[in-house]
Image (cartoon, rainbow, N blue to C red):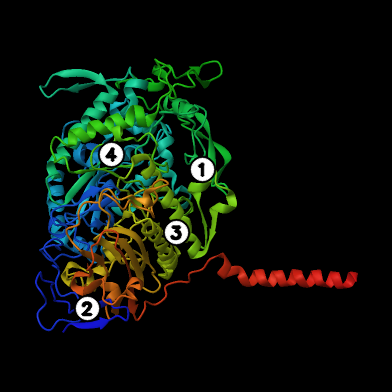
Amino acid sequence: MASSVPSDLDASFVLVNDDYVPSSSASAGTPTPGAMQSRHLNSTLLSPATPSYAHDWSPSGTGGKLSQHGRHFIDAHGRVCHLRGVNLSGNCKTPIHDTFPDNPAAVTFVNRPFPIEDAPQHFARLRRWGLTFVRFLVTWEAVEHAGPGEYDYDYLNYLKQVLALLPQYGLSCFVALHQDVWSRYSGGSGAPAWTIESAGFDLDALEESGSAWLNGLRVKTAEGKYDEEDRGTVKPEERGLWSTGYQKLAAATLATCFWAGDTFAPKAKVKRRTKTGNEEEVSIQQFLQDDFLDMWEVLADTVGHLPGVLGFEIMNEPHRGYVELQSMYGWDYNTDLHLGAIPSPLHSFTLGAGYSTSVPHYTRSFPMPTRHTSSVTLNTAGRKVWREDGVTEGKCIWEMHGVWGWDEQKKEGIVLRENYFKRHPLTGKPVDWYNDFYFPFLSRWADRVRTVVDNDKMVFVEAIPNEFCPSSWTPDHQPGNLVYAPHWYDLNALFNKAFGDFSVNVQGLSRGMFLLKAFYWGHIGARNNFSLQIKNLAEAAYRSLGEKPVLIGECGIPMDMNQGEAFESEDWTWQNRMMDAMITALERSFIGFTLWNYNPSNSDLHGDTWNGENFSFFAQRRALPPSLLTLDQTSPTLDNGARLLRAVVRPYAAKVAGIPLKWKYELNTGDCELEWMVPYSNGHEDSQAKGGPTVDQPPLVGHPTLTSNTTEIFFPHILSQDRTLSVSSPLDSSSASPTFTSEYVPSLQTLYIQQLDMTPGKKYHIKIRLDPSLKQAFELNDFWTDFIGHIYLGGGFIFAIAAWFFVGFL
């Protein structure tokens, strides 16, 4: 039985029973005053003909497909769409049951991230949580581990089957080619082992020579026995060491050869088989890039036609290698993590050439993140990393190009060309990684992918991690349908694996922010801190790229922070606080995101089974067995196995019939607030666009014609169950008649707002309340709430002392 709760502000709300499905005709029975009785108001403003739910990004839920206009994603009706979801999944970085680092060609990634028969429960779970936009991870190794041109069609077929299921659950995705530190065999994930060998490296000598750090990927016990459970575990003092691999010889050399081998390593020639079976010799850059593009064509051709695949991302967190290297004698402390043994580029060259070398060792410290505390001698056995039968014939590739040499008298390496990677070796012209190497290859990649997929597929890109979008990323360097998808993490919490009342704006400090301005206190402070950082990231992109969509491709929090106390206490307050601060910051900028990460393989002890990371807020081993699950959106059985749902699963304005101006959600009460405006037609002066692009002043002119007057808000059943929703508007308080009607359908987790006035420039402002309110999860504190009493007490004490002295003086 439907019931209505009229608002005292002339806006109203209808709560319907769970099996109710909205129809395109008027509701049966006696109309309820003020309630939405029809989703079709007139012939020019039509809502979707097929009932959908707010977070449904399938073709049926978007009226055909998602596209982009300016900074917004829009559906076929012109509504602005807010996408949020997860990275699926961290376990896609590693194969099933391998014996790393042995037998690299014999691995399989079939059933990563999960077996095909498990897909329905995972997709239904994400739908229930409103996390229906997926960054689906694939690695080059997964597709082509056996050798150049040898594709794993079993994996590609598995991939196609999994992604074909997405629309059935309202999900869509973009496929992201993942890499960290180039490859698993150089300490991260991504490229096949044979790419490292192609540059002349001996895989068996990488670790002993100090050319890579592999401890965070091993799957063998001390006794040498295989143990899948032991994969990716590290000692406490080793946490975070994996990212220093970017500065080590293997990863830095491969990245340099991939992007700029023709410039900096022209003598490195690789023999390959042509498609006609003949042998030819090509440069290392051409070899790697051509194979990369061939692999991408196969991948895109396999899944690009699927309706649930909206686009592709060329490469996760690209790195420039040695390109633009400022000094052979050290890395930049402000941009490159210094932790553990940190060889300078010259140190790496000598180590790889088989010379025992003493290098600086850094440990964690305060207030600076790390400090040089000692030195350590690496490669004491004098193991050379270069193969005699490789492209360099056993010689360091950089020694072969005259970058450095070995002084036999002094028994040390000497730099011969200090500016080698800063200027073109032949012309002397300064090089720029983005302009000279990344942008041209990005264009080649986009063109190649679009030979096998429709041109309307989106292209997701990002800058080098922790850098703002470069100002040189002008329109002539932008493929069509570009989406900027940078990553954001709280670097202070990430580095220390700790979060409390004190937070730091590392982004600001690295760019010269005054020290005291970079410090924040309390939960309000953390929200403000994160909000400023994400706003800066987005606005830098708008300034450089123009009005292009920005979506945070990775953001998340470590589950094992604060010494893993929550695993013992089951008190996840600090994790909830940090997650809420982060998502609140994203919401303030109205930026979509995909959380890192949803990993069914996660466990408390071993985390995400990769380099000691533990970011997944879900683990299959904690979930109910499939026999006990029901997959509808109101099923609480899907929630088992998850953490932090109070912070993660939250309402959001998914499809807005207008331009969103503000969204606010308070986790402690469940209250929401949305402001939006019907856009002006072309020719109207856009006063809000003056003064440069900002996150809170989007363009209000030139939006495509809206063919729907229904705004759809995802409101999770996990919050609304056994509660009443009320919708009101301060703008309607003095109106004789309401300007909108509303209807909440619990079974679809959707609050429908039907706008009765679509006049350009019309503003809407609604407030959503839960009755009873949610139970407070934590205190909203800041410096003043926590210390005002101490300040008054201290001030009073000082005043009393001063008065005592004053009276004594008289």
Q: Amino acid at mark 1?
A: Arg
Eye-nearest disc, 4 or 2: 2
Verify CB contact (< 8 Å) between mark 4 and mark 2: no
Q: Where residue 86 sits in the image (x, y, percent)?
A: 28, 56
Residue positioned 39% across, 17% down in the render: 400
* Residue assigned mark 2: 34
Verify CB contact (< 8 Å) between mark 4 and mark 1: no
Q: Which quarter of the rendering shows the N terminus? A: bottom left
Q: Amino acid at mark 3?
A: Met
Eye-nearest disc, 3 or 1: 1
Q: Amino acid at mark 2?
A: Gly
- 3D distance between C-alphas at marks 3 and 4: 32 Å
Q: Relative to residue 35, is residue 504 drawn left or right?
A: right
Q: Where residue 394 sits in the image (x, y, percent)?
A: 35, 20
Q: Relative to residue 291, is residue 531 drawn left or right?
A: right
* Residue assigned mark 3: 561
Verify CB contact (< 8 Å) between mark 3 and mark 4: no
* Residue assigned mark 4: 102
Q: Where residue 414 sits in the image (x, y, percent)?
A: 51, 20
Residue situated furthest right in the rendering: 810
- 3D distance between C-alphas at marks 2 and 3: 49 Å
**Under tag 1, what secondary structure?**
loop
- 3D distance between C-alphas at marks 4 and 2: 69 Å
Q: Which quarter of the rendering shows the C terminus? A: bottom right
